[in-house]
Image (cartoon, rainbow, N blue to C red):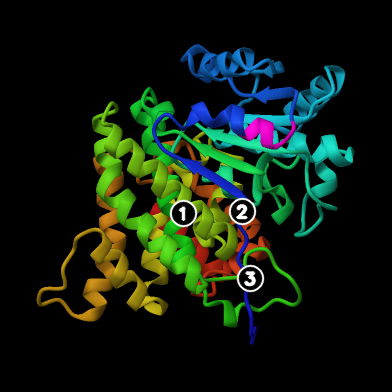
Amino acid sequence: MRNSWEYFSTENIIFGNGSIDRLDKVLKRLKAKNVFVITDRGVAQAGILAKITEQLDRHGYQSIVYDKAVPEPPIDSVVEAYEFAKSQMKTDVIIGLGGGSSIDLAKVVALLMEYSGHPRDYFGGENLVPGPIAPLIAIPTTAGTGSEVTSVAVVTDTENDMKVGISDNFLRPAVALLDPELTVGLPAYVTACSGIDALSHAVEAYTAKDFRYIQAEGNILFQGALPITDALAIQAIELIANNLAIAVQQGSNIEARSNMLLGSLLAGMAFSNAGTALAHALAYPIGGKAKSPHGELTGLLLPYVMEFNTATEKEKMIKIAEAFGIEKGDKSKTEHAKEASKAVFELLKDIGLPTKLSAIGVKEEDLEEIAEKALPIERLIRNNPRVPTKDSLVELLKKAY
């Protein structure tokens, strides 16, 4: 039994409409003169990049932009971005601007800028990063991954046909700057995928195995459910449950956008300490076979995993059902607990996302291999409140198929 826990967070979080205007103050505090901005073409075309570069130009910073970030960046693109950064001016601060993939790419580039090497050097374990990475400011333009405050960067290992997480508390950005106004132009589909990903972070952090019963030795990154993460996660679930469908259907609703960005932030603060679990473990091998965004995968899997876990996590599932506004009425405890997974299933339909693996191109003959590849992802599997076996995972995947 583990007797103690720790809580880690990004040092400085700035949140609110128009908070992008505080970028100069942040850069002055970091004593920056030369700034390397990592983003993607979509953010540039939407005019969001211009809002950042205007700030940098107005206050006299030298800046270089790399705008070739792609979803779940393949290793080759990480190396390309790093080589580009090295070939340019001396960099004092890196800004990761965009969705989780741009921020994750910025994290790995900041890691390599500080310690060199290859992304593969940091795969396959926890606490492999030697120390603090190069100073990084994360500015999210989606409400989903929580990457602006997390200790994880997801890249695609194209050789093994699988998404891989580099995990270490040193990967947390120095500053998270969240301006809800930057998310207003987000398309409905991207809003849905990123929002349901935030919900999966919150639910899996909240229902993770209690920290005392995580079977692992020494310092671990994902510690299981903690008192602080429970409070953050249930608040995130309530915010997302009440605002995601509105944000998808009414893209210019700034209140819904703000609540979603806050929900994503709180979920990131929760899961980067408690950890995620089975839905994310399954999403990694499925991500190598389906071209769906990461959030679409975790969202699709989430209600099936919740149903699987309800037998061992009734009380928390009831709290989740209540966060969705579902009252007990004359239902039994078990029936009320099962309403949580049903509520997520209905939310997926409301926001137009798939609820079956067959709908995203996964083949039935792949299910056994997916189960086999998910089980060794121990940092996630040990977090799940119900211990999965290969047979139980195949059964779960068949239900989701």
| CA distance separating discs 1 and 2 | 30 Å
> CB of mark 1 within 8 Å of CB of mark 2?
no
Nearest the viewer among 26 and 78 is 26
Label 1 element class: helix
Q: Where is residue 15 in the image (x, y as percent from the top left)?
A: 46, 41
Q: How crowded is mark 3: few (under 14 residues within 10 Å), some or many (20 or more)?
A: few
As for residue 229 lying within the magenta part, the answer is no
Task: Give the class, few, some or many, for how many residues have Cα within 10 Å of label 1's Cα (few <14, many ≥20).
Answer: many
Residue at image position (16%, 73%) is 328
Question: Dot 2 corresponds to which residue?
Answer: 369
Q: Main secondary structure of the magenta part?
A: helix
Which residue appears at 83% of the width and 18% of the height? 89
User: Label 2: how many residues lie within 10 Å, few (<14), some (14-19) or many (20+)?
Assistant: few
What's the mark number on residue 6? 3
Spot occupied by residue 314 in the image (x, y as percentages of width and height):
34, 77
Residue 28 among those drawn in magenta:
yes
Give the CA distance from mark 3 to mark 2. 35 Å
Q: Which mark is residue 267?
A: 1
Q: Quadrant of residue 331?
A: bottom left
